[in-house]
Image (cartoon, rainbow, N blue to C red):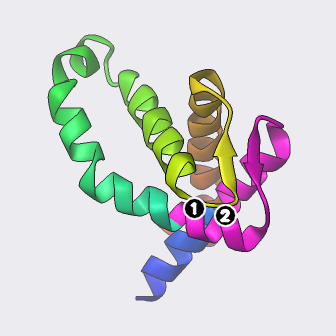
Amino acid sequence: MKSLVLTWGIHSLSLYLVAMLLPQIHVDSFLQAVLASGVIGFLNVLVKPILVLFTLPVTMITLGVFLFVINALILLLASAITPGFSVDGIGTALAGSILMTIFSIILRGLTHEH
């Protein structure tokens, strides 16, 4: 349970930092980032495996780089259903998903959460 809460906190902080860096990603407050991070996690469990399955050939051809596009789509979908969180376009969502990945890796390294 402690690991789940820490991981959720890391992803929430990552999302909040991305929103501070990219003006096209809007988060009303850190609490909204926590909510949006939860929605993203929920979508990653339910929707992402289906998207990965359908796009497997493209993902294999691009050596996994297409997964960033899938993450961007998940980010856009989360912004569509989460109040207080918005992403202005697929390009911004792609940049945001890459930055979130980088921030999450750094924060996990700092907290020794693997």
Q: Quadrant of residue 57?
A: top left
**Label 2 crowd (10 A; few <14 / some 14-19 / many >=20):** many
**Element type at marker 1?**
helix
Q: In the image, what residue type sits under mark 1?
A: Ala
Magenta-tinted stretch: 13-37
Instruction: Check disc 2 and report its element: helix, strand or loop.
Output: helix
Q: Residue 8 location, x and y as percent? A: 53, 71
Relative placement, left or right, of 43 versus 86 is left
Q: State the residue position of label 2.
A: 33
Q: Residues within 10 Å of mark 1 (few under 14, many from 20)?
A: many
Q: Residue furthest top?
A: 61
Q: CA distance from mark 2 to mark 1?
A: 5 Å
The answer to whether residue 84 is above or below residue 30 is above
Residue 56 image offset from top left, x and y in percent: 18, 25
Q: Are marks 2 and 1 in contact (CB under 8 Å)?
A: yes
Residue 111 locus on image (x, y percent): 62, 71
Residue at 79% in and 37% down: 22
The answer to whether 85 is drawn above or below residue 5 in the figure is above
| Residue 57 forms part of the magenta stretch | no
Q: Pick whichever, 107 or 40, lies toward us.
A: 40
**Residue 54 in view (yes/no):** yes
Rendered location of residue 75, percent (x, y)? 52, 43
Q: Residue at x 46, y 56 (%)?
A: 40
Mark 1, residue position: 36
